[in-house]
Image (cartoon, helix red, strand yellow):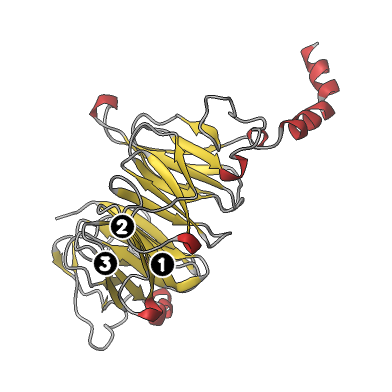
Amino acid sequence: MRIAVNRIRELPQNSKIVATHTDSPDVLIWDVESQPNRHPVLGASASRPDLVLTGHQENAEFALAMCPTEPFVLSGGKDQSVVLWSIHDHISSLAADQGAAKSPGSKGGAVNGKSSDSPTIQARGIFQGHTDTVEDVQFCPSSAQEFCSVGDDSCLILWDARTGSAPVVKVEKAHSADLHCVDWNPNDVNLILTGSADNTVRMFDRRNLTNGGVGSPVHIFEGHSAAVLCVQWSPDRSSVFGSAAEDGILNVWDYGKIGKLEGAGTGSSDSPPGLFFRHAGHRDKVVDFHWNSSDPWTIVSVSEDGEKTGGGGTLQIWRMMDLLYRPEEEVLAELDKFKSHLLTCAS
């Protein structure tokens, strides 16, 4: 029996290693390079994961993150828990010998509903504090021991594995509805974004977070007409981020522009503060997206197209013109350099 892959994440320390979430409690680790059917070769043997990460008691379908500083994996699930693993001791063996013997004390996992010979890794820590499904998790960009999570209980929780399994800070009402996504600013570790079924994106400063009560965001971004499913900071500019939602729109924001005169972007008076670009090329809800870290302003986005648009899904790779972001005076000055060329072409 085959089951759906709901999320996939790449290990920053080794691009050949990926983790996947399926409709099961386990997180599966794959060495892409060693998989027998990575190319469409007739008669290739069936794939099996190189490692199975165990620790969830119920399905873990969406909340999945890889640590940028250490080979750690973080997951959240329907069992209301956040689970942390380290695969440090297995990285070299994964790359060198996919058929290596099981580690001492390991046991077989279950893949596609069948028994597997893949070695398993037990959790380094299981963190309890949510009262409903954990929908997303994220590591602090500068620490493998610090991370955050959001869930259907409307909570934003900050954790530190060095202090135990209890929350460090638990904001009980970060939004007025379920939280679907969270991201930690890689260029300013004090700023955290959350997206919710209340159609908003909120930015929090972790230095101002307190336990209990209603969260006090730095700003609330209102530019979607349906639940926000994904948020991600730009790797290139510390104040820029994107948000994608069930309305089929991917918005690009700059919180540094709030309260300032917008430049050459969409800064009209009826635009939400900070919003300077809207990508409306998808046919239905945009479920995930990522910035290209090597090519500024390039984004890959994925939509889950419903029955009204023919079903299936769509993947798009698109790039914004940087002229949309830059100040109007700077854009006009650059265009003026090409004025004679443009006039020649027009004539």
Sooner in the amino-acid sequence: mark 2 or mark 3 = 3
Discs 2/3, front: 2
Q: Which mark is residue 147?
A: 1
Sooner in the amino-acid sequence: mark 1 or mark 2 = 1
Mark 1 vs 2: CB contact within 8 A: no
Q: Which mark is residue 10?
A: none
Mark 2 vs 3: CB contact within 8 A: no
Q: 10 Å neighbourhood of mark 1: few (<14), some, or many (≥20)?
A: many
Question: Within the image, what quadrant is residue 45 found in?
Answer: bottom left
Q: 10 Å neighbourhood of mark 3: few (<14), some, or many (≥20)?
A: some
Q: What is the three-letter code of the residue carrying label 3? A: Gly
How far is the residue under mark 1 from the one under mark 2? Answer: 17 Å
Q: Nearer the viewer, residue 91 or 287?
A: 287
* Secondary structure category for the residue under label 2: loop
Q: What is the three-letter code of the residue carrying label 1? A: Phe
Query: Where is mark 3, residue-wise?
Result: 129
Point out the image quarter for the C terminus.
top right
Discs 1/2, front: 2
Query: Where is mark 2, residue-wise?
Result: 172
Instruction: Tell me if residue 226 comes above or below residue 44 in the rendering.
Output: above
